[in-house]
Image (cartoon, rainbow, N blue to C red):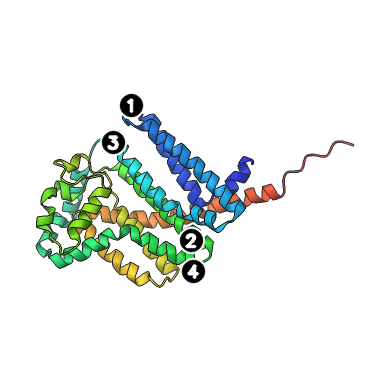
Amino acid sequence: MNVRRILSHLSPADLVTISFLLFLSLLNLIFAARVEVWYILVTINVVMSMLIVILAVNAETRRTKLLIGMHRWYLYPMVIGVFKELYFMIKPIHPIDYDQLLIQIDYWMFGVNPTEWLAQISHPVLTEVLQVAYSSYYLLFIALGVQIYRRYPLRDFDRAGFLLVYGFFLSYLGYFLLPAVGPRFTLHNFHLLNEELPGLLFTNALRDFVNFGESIPKGIPNPVDVVQRDVFPSGHTQLSLVVVYLAFQHRTSLRWVLGITVTLLIIGTVYLRYHYVIDILAGGAFFFFNVWSGHHIESWWNRVRNRLSHAILVPDQPPEPPA
């Protein structure tokens, strides 16, 4: 199978995923002296890129339900896997935390530190509701994806999947540019969070779940040393807004539920001390760029695929020999 045929089978989501994996591999090679496990990460990225190509080609040629489903849904575990790869890269490559800059911007905008100011209105019921909403983040994508996958043409699911995976990778670039740990470490005592912001039934368990995802083992004495640098921009804000945008665009039955949940989630990012307000504003700006540039990239690559498919169906004719 030639290169043109292979490329014609790659969706926009495949393209941006492989491109980002290769970008991370290049970074690992450039900073191999700093990233201890660079060779493992590069190997994983190359293997995953090859598997994506194999899956895409087989899904688009064999057209079985299983392969088509795998080709669409692999994106979900992929963005989580890439997120964890960043854990081994960001701090060694860019070992400066920019929390003080973000704190200064917030203080310049409000004259106070927003998370400290919000502490005066804290209440266990409010904390519980916002922690549940914040922790529902990854469920939003499943809820939206299932609705679009079951009720709309496959091309609609492909467009939604591309916008989301592309958005994740955009936010990951921000983590490289301005690493930070968030106000729960800088403006507050992380170990006193359960006492200062108590919830009701699920808050503590959900906090532990979030901490686990951030690579913070329970009971570690210096969590700021191991926490993932993923504050600026607020990916929770950016990608949650993409979910709401897609839900209302497709008029899904869950659109209002998702809209309310995302509103609470965004409020919770600051109230629960995960983010500074400037992170939220940056997440909003990334959302608009995500949607605008994503549509252009998707349209461009689909045009390229159509040209490649046409070239395969109508191959170039060899010149006729002279009479």
Nearer to us in this view, 292 or 250: 250
Residue placed under numbered mark 2 in the picture? 157
- Answer with mark 2 or mark 4, whichever residue precedes in sequence: 4
- Image quarter hosting the C terminus: top right
Q: Residue at x 47, y 38 (%)?
A: 47
> Which dot, 3 or 4, sits closer to the camera?
4
Residue that numbered label 4 is attached to: 151
Which three-letter amino acid code belongs to the residue tagged 2? Answer: Phe
At numbered mark 4, what does the secondary structure look like: helix, strand or loop?
helix
Spot occupied by residue 299 in the image (x, y as percentages of width and height): 53, 55
> Residue 210's x, y, as percent?
25, 52
Give the CA distance from mark 2 to mark 4: 10 Å
Q: Which residue is mark 1?
A: 33
Residue type at the position of mark 4:
Arg
| Farthest residue, direction right | 323
Which x, y percent locates residue 200? 15, 64
Question: Callout 2 environment at 10 Å: few (<14), some (14 to 19), or many (20+)?
Answer: many
Kindly check if marks 3 and 4 are in contact, taking CB atoms under 8 A apart as contact: no
